Amino acid sequence: MKEFNVVKEVNNIIEFIRYYYKKNNLNGAIIGISGGKDSGVVAALMVMAIGCENVIGVTLPCYSNKDDLDDAKLISDYYNFKLINYDLDNSYNVLKNTLGNDEYYAYNSNLNLKPRLRMLSLYYLAALYTSKENRNYIVVGTSNKCEKYVGYFTKGGDSVADIFPILDYTVSEVIEIGKYLKVPEKVLLKIPSDGLGDLSDEEKLGVKYSDIEKYFIDKNSVSDDIRKRIDYLHKINNHKNKLNYYRRLR
Amino acid sequence: MKEFNVVKEVNNIIEFIRYYYKKNNLNGAIIGISGGKDSGVVAALMVMAIGCENVIGVTLPCYSNKDDLDDAKLISDYYNFKLINYDLDNSYNVLKNTLGNDEYYAYNSNLNLKPRLRMLSLYYLAALYTSKENRNYIVVGTSNKCEKYVGYFTKGGDSVADIFPILDYTVSEVIEIGKYLKVPEKVLLKIPSDGLGDLSDEEKLGVKYSDIEKYFIDKNSVSDDIRKRIDYLHKINNHKNKLNYYRRLR
């Protein structure tokens, strides 16, 4: 890995957040707290940038692992920001039934419905708090560089947010930032999982984050199979990163 | 307005759609049909590009005007594609109640919840039909160039789709295309309205689409007030068109 000056990077990210908030007359942040390292690190950065009193963490379980709620609580207790919980089980069921739930065929539909419901909930809350407190709240995204490159996110779900503090940082860099900001180790060193299904991220991707990081530095530093797998994931998922439209000839 | 060769433009759009479908091994299209001109024109283009048997129109009323359903039916009857209706009233209510419905403060929250619920429903259906028919469906977007420029759309709502056939065409160009494709006049000449609240688009925007088109050709062809209004709308809403993240220094 290239040398990584964590102090400098953290300072730059915080400066960027403060500049954006000031320029756009913003006040507060709504962050979905999954209990994983990305949302933990993003919450820590936002608390440092705009103050814990301006950060609202939201847990949005949807048939989720109950342990994740404890980890979210661990983060909010440590950084002293407000944490609210809304259970989405009921909304999820009503939507599935409305749209023709189908035990056999709806596996993928159901899977991606959850992050989309969370996105819509976070925006709902940002607008609600903006109106209630007459202060401007935005939704903060928690995606990282590795996920973005291989397209490991849901279009219209976790990919939609108003500011992404760690999108230009790899998984191990996010962990470095988290260590520096004293994000609880339990959260930081948890095996990354999107909570959709039983497999970890790396099991689903068929490739390790550490290999994606090696690939970023030098494509030839990983085996042929791994390089092909990363190229393939990037190729089939990169449509999620782009607006695809016909551009007329001028 | 600059000269507009509608035959050439329609041919190019269709070629673009066919190329994209072939390259990505796609088969079908899911389109939200509001009953307005944009979705009417997009449906017509998709039918021409991939065939009516591969197009599924979806109406997703959410406390909507019932007349819009009739107009959607008019379009699907004319172009002979399947039209399915799912009423989102119930899902909308359950979500509002889950997230703390608030008569007084939730006006904006509720407003944008509808297009986000529609986006999520269209993706749900695309994945469901893909699985059921073992053929690849994508979600087709209906935004146009004027809406995009002034940011008249919902982030995470109608701005999320897999392909946007008319995003590079202004409102009057979309109408030209619609006339050429024989989109029913009732639909084509309807006063544009997003169906969220009682006002038309132009009343909400405080500017006419025809003025936005003049502005595109020459910013100085509109009055100072109008130019300032368009500049302002573009400035405050352009964040919806961009991914906002900290880019580290290299």
Image (cartoon, coloured by chain):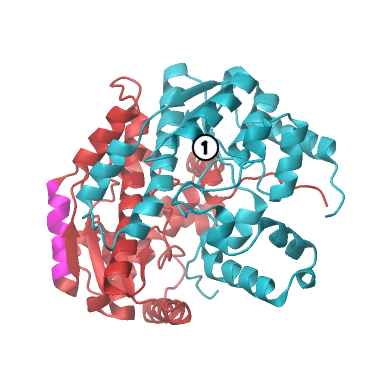
Chain colours: A cyan, B red
**Between A87 and B170, the one nearer to me in the picture:** A87
Q: Quadrant of residue B62?
A: top left
Q: Quadrant of residue B116?
A: top left
Q: Amino acid at mark 1?
A: Ser
Locate residue B193, reporting x and y percent.
28, 47
Residue at image location 22% in from the left, 77% down from the top: B53
Residue at image location 77% in from the left, 36% down from the top: A10
Q: Which residues are magenta?
A: B66-77
Q: Secondary structure at mark 1?
A: loop
The chief SS type of the magenta part is helix
Total of numbered circles in the picture?
Answer: 1
The reply to whether residue B153 is visible in this rendering is: no
Q: Is residue A138 left or right of residue A78?
A: left
**Between A108 and B1, the one nearer to me in the picture:** A108
Q: Is residue A120 left or right of residue B104?
A: right
**Between B232 and A246, the one nearer to me in the picture:** A246
Locate residue A241, reporting x and y percent.
56, 59
Chain of residue at mark 1: A
**Between B3 and B84, the one nearer to me in the picture:** B84
Q: Is residue A216 left or right of residue B56?
A: right
Residue at image location 42% in from the left, 35% down from the top: A60
The reply to whether residue B214 is visible in this rendering is: yes
Residue A135 is covered by the magenta coloring = no
Question: Quick one: quadrant of the N terminus of chain B?
Answer: bottom left
Q: Quadrant of residue B28?
A: bottom left
Residue at image location 60% in from the left, 67% down from the top: A234
Residue B68 is covered by the magenta coloring = yes
Placement of B31 over or under A84, stated as above or below: below
Residue of label 1: A34
Locate residue B196, reporting x and y percent.
28, 40
Q: Residues within 10 Å of mark 1 (few under 14, many from 20)?
A: many
